[in-house]
Structures are given as C-alpha cells and as structure tokens.
Image (cartoon, rainbow, N blue to C red):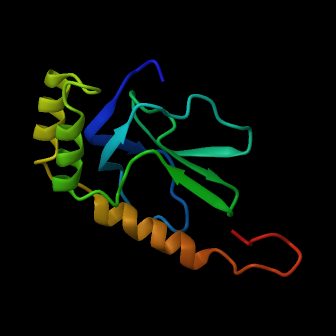
Amino acid sequence: SDKGWGVGLHRYDVRANEPWMHPRARTIAIPVSHQDQVVAISDDARVIASSGFTPYAGLAWGEDAISFQCHPEFQPDYAAALIEGRRGARIPHDLADEAIDSLKRPNDRAVLTAWIRAFLLLTPPPVEDQGSGI
C-alpha cells in the first residue's frame, strides 16, 4: 500500500454484526505490523472492520472465510520488540515511537480472539468431495 507501515495499536470501526461476533463491539483496537494491505475486494466480500488507514481491515466471505489485517496473536511486548527491530531500517523513528506508545493503551485482542474462535466453532465440518468445509 502507498500508506506505508501500519504499526502499533490500531483502532477499527466494526461494520457488521455477524452471528459469531460476540461479545459485540463498536470498535476494536488490535496490534498491527504490516506494510502491505488489501486495497480492493471481490464482490462477494463483506467489510466487517475498517479504519481510515486500513479500509479492509476485516473481511468475510459468505459463511466460509474471514480475514483480518491486524494481529490479535501479538502480545503488546512482542509487537513493540518487532517495531524496535525494524526501527530506522524499515520504520521511521518517529513512527516507531508513536507505535510503541500506542501499545501501552488497552487493547481488544480477547474480543477478536473470541470472534475467531466462535467463527471456527460455527463453521460446518468438511463434507467429503465438497472441498474443505472452511
């Protein structure tokens, strides 16, 4: 993307209320670390989370697939260490400082993790000769 690096804690507006999205939230703040991002989506994709920096932060396709640009698996300390490792070489110093400061704020990793878990539990198991079922 021409927007450059997305690092630190980013807040996304929740754009959908899918059956697996419990607990409900209007926004979620999740650690990110990416230079590339989705810039166009297919006709069958639904935007479920977005921000000004990342308009396609969360996507769903039917009942079969979801994706997120952010990293709910990143502990804030890990995200900060990743930023430090890229400071100056890939990530400008001022952006690194802002990103590391942002990681000190409360995050919604547990919310997004619950959504992903619920999605996986609600997805039907594979059907023989009909693909993966996911």
Q: Is residue 32 left or right of residue 82?
A: right
Foreground of the two, 21 or 113: 113
Res. 97 visible in picture: yes
Q: Is residue 82 left or right of residue 111?
A: left
Residue 30 percent location from the top left of the image: 30, 50
Residue 102 percent location from the top left of the image: 15, 40
Foreground of the two, 2 or 18: 2
Q: Which residue corresponds to the image point at 35% horizontal and 57% vertical from the top-left?
A: 72
Res. 22 visible in picture: no
Residue 13 percent location from the top left of the image: 39, 42
- Picture quadrant where residue 33 is located: top left
Name the outermost residue toward the right.
129
Q: Is residue 58 left or right of residue 101?
A: right
Residue 12 percent location from the top left of the image: 36, 42
Q: Which residue corresponds to the image point at 85% horizontal and 81% vertical from the top-left?
A: 128
Q: Which residue corresponds to the image point at 45% horizontal and 44% vertical from the top-left?
A: 69
Instruction: Tell me: residue 117, above or below residue 4.
Output: below
The C terminus appears in which quarter of the rendering? Answer: bottom right
Number of on-image labels: 0
- Picture quadrant where residue 38 is located: top right
Q: Is residue 80 left or right of residue 22?
A: left
Q: Which residue corresponds to the image point at 32% horizontal and 50% vertical from the top-left?
A: 28
Instruction: Tell me: residue 128, above or below residue 36.
Output: below
Name the outermost residue toward the top.
2
